Image (cartoon, coloured by chain):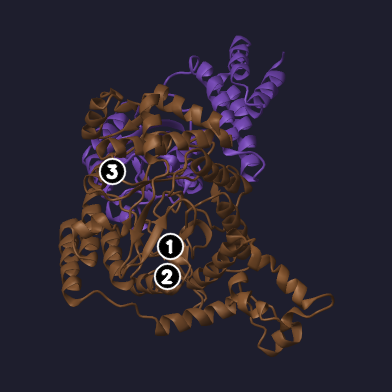
Amino acid sequence: MREIHAASIGILKNIGVEMRNEKALKIMHEAGVEVDFRRQVARFPSSLVEETIKKVSGGEWALYGREGYKVGFTGREAHFYTQTEISPIAGKVGGFTQYVLDLNLMERREANEKDVIDSIRLADYLENIKVVGPSVSDQTLPPKLRIIHNAASLVNNTAKPGAIEVFTLDDLECVVRIASIAVGGIEELKTRPMLLTPVEATSPLRYSSNVLENVMFLAKHKLPITFYTMPIPGVSAPVTLAGAIALGNAEVWAGAVFAKLLNSEVNVGLGIRVTIFDQRTLTHSYAAPEHQLALIASLQLLNEFYNVSNRRVSGIRTDANFPGIQAGYEKAATGLSVLLAGATLVGNLGFLRSCDTFSCEQLVIDNEIVSTLNRYVKGFEVNEKTIAANVIEEVGIGGNFLLHKHTPTHLRSEYWFPELADRIGWDEWKGKGEKDALDKAKEKVKRILESHFPEPLDRDAQKEIQKIVKEADKRLLR
Amino acid sequence: MDKEDILHKIVDSVKNYGVDEAASLAREALNAKIDPIEVIEKGFTKGLREVGELFGSGEIFLSELIMAAQAAKAGMDVLKTAIPKETQISLGKVVIGTVEGDIHDLGKNIVAAMLEANGFEVYDLGVDIPAERFIEKVREVEADILGMSALLTTTTPCMRDVIQALKESNILKKVKVIVGGAAVTPGYAEAIGADAYAEDATAAVKIAKKLVGKD
């Protein structure tokens, strides 16, 4: 880890990062960063980087939903999220996760507004999802409008804090205004931030102008900023994993340095996702073992070496196109490894292959996978009550613990029980209709969508938000 | 070495990614007075074809395909000095870039590499390219094809401007335009008058070959 850290410091000092925004470069220049204005490259002195690491390290912060719902980033527990993906890897048209796997129709179809709202309602219901982003976007809308419409649907259909990725400053301003209305004002939003809007570097070693504008906006309003990067070994980063991580690490810290220069009080989160590109088939693999290795290493770095409390990773993934066996084992394996490596914000639940397809059933299954993983990571307590020496004595040699009160008293807190997975024998299973987890997931999705309707915002708030959406529609389509 | 030997060794140099070897063998071929066009067709292009087949069957990697193309290019650059300028040795000339306001270039880089490995002469302008630069380069190199890429939906209008300008010029209206990137759809490509939409690198190569009539 020390070697990688040293390499990143070297990259930042000697090669630098392209920051394609004049205003941002001026600010950095004034703070002692070596700036080449012609090439738009900033080279960071190691002392400044080390200072920033100290400022970010150990910082704890939280996101807040409605009615006191709090998601704390202490660095010691993991929270799971849903969110559309708009990276180049997701790659489809206008991005923002285009498709829904509709098991009723047995087809993959384009998502619409109902799908957006259903995906939010489901995530709102599922107990293990702590940060809710819309999982798809309405494909009937022109791409430019999707973010803002998604933001409006989001705040009205969940009481949990939200996650939404934005491109332009215009998007960000609208989204922040919408979030402010939902929580009761911009000041409220600042003290109890409700929204995560991750910003992305463009490997190798670049930040685009719109991303920097967004960083400046968020820092000005003291809203949290999570810097994220997805270097691709062999294409936008060295093909060897250590080099890809060193590069990605340099990129996110460059972002953090800039953020802290803008506003030393702004809360920062980091994420490095080395993304594997198969050079034979020219496709991305999310379940490739190297992907997991690199994620684990990056998380260890952020956790053990830098002690950053918000360690974000889109880490529960599958390459499968269908919520079947491959999806199951890949999700469980990828999820466990990133949790054990120390991720504190993990997503994106509910996705299939390449995150351009969302499945409600997969979301419900992921929720259960995550709950079993949580149990692994929780461990167990060793103390007088759990060693239960007195109970062992009382029950005695050859005795029956079922009869001792200690058993029912501690059973529910010590054990996890599945809802979708089976633990019944063959005959009973056949008798109950031979259902598998997917069948049960389908039933659960139906139940939730038929009965769970989160409390909408009050009439006035909804009207104000609709106004913003309509204005944006007009403005962006001009 | 006789002609057959040299040609064999040239094919090998491409398959072994030997840039220096390819260049020195090309010089040897010229010294031996072998017809340079024959050296290209039976040596370098043959080597590239075989490498292309290995790639198509998943046996070699994209970065290896690129190295093979670099070796072939090194050899062909030497041979170019002995060929009259007007003779076409590549499948066609392609200018490619990411549009103004956008710096995403992953896909574009892969497309450029694949086109080159498949025998096109590629001029990659890079990222954040304004309309005028595209047009200027197309004019300068007498390109057959222009490829434009965009990830951000806010930057796609630049493509429309370029296509418009090309169509208005007598010289440039026969340039074929391929567009791609996450911000582009087949519908949008049609609406702005592009000749084709390429979903990925493999499609781009197929389309490019078709557009120059070499499929």
Front residue of A425/A84: it is A425
| Few, some or many residues within 10 Å of mark 1 (<14, 14–19, 20+) | many
Question: Horizontal placement of A110 versus B29: left or right?
Answer: left
Chain rendered brown: A
Which residue, as the protein is rendered here, is positioned at the far top?
B31
- Mark 3: secondary structure: loop
Badge 1: chain ID: A
Task: Give the quarter of the image for residue B150.
Answer: top left
Judging from the image, mark 2 belongs to the subunit labelled: A
The answer to whether residue B101 of the structure is visible from this angle is: no
Q: Position of residue A166 (x, y in %)?
A: 31, 53
Structural crowding at the residue carrying mark 3, measured as other residues with C-alpha within 10 Å and reported as few (<14), some (14–19) or many (≥20) = some
* Quadrant in the rendering for residue A29: top left
Q: Circle 2 sits on which residue?
A: A123
Chain ID, purple in image: B
Q: Nearer the viewer, residue B196 or B154?
A: B154
Judge whether residue A24 can be spotted in this image. Answer: yes
Callout 1: SS: loop
Residue name at image x 51 percent, y 51 percent: A343
The residue positioned 16% from the left and 74% from the top of the image is A460
Question: How far apart are the two marked residues, 3 and 2, measured between alpha carbons?
Answer: 31 Å
x and y percentages locating residue A377 in the rendered image: 59, 58
- Residue type beneath disc 3: Glu
Q: Label 3 belongs to which residue?
A: A265
When asked about the image quadrant of residue A191, the answer is bottom left
Residue displayed at 45% across by 24% down: A10
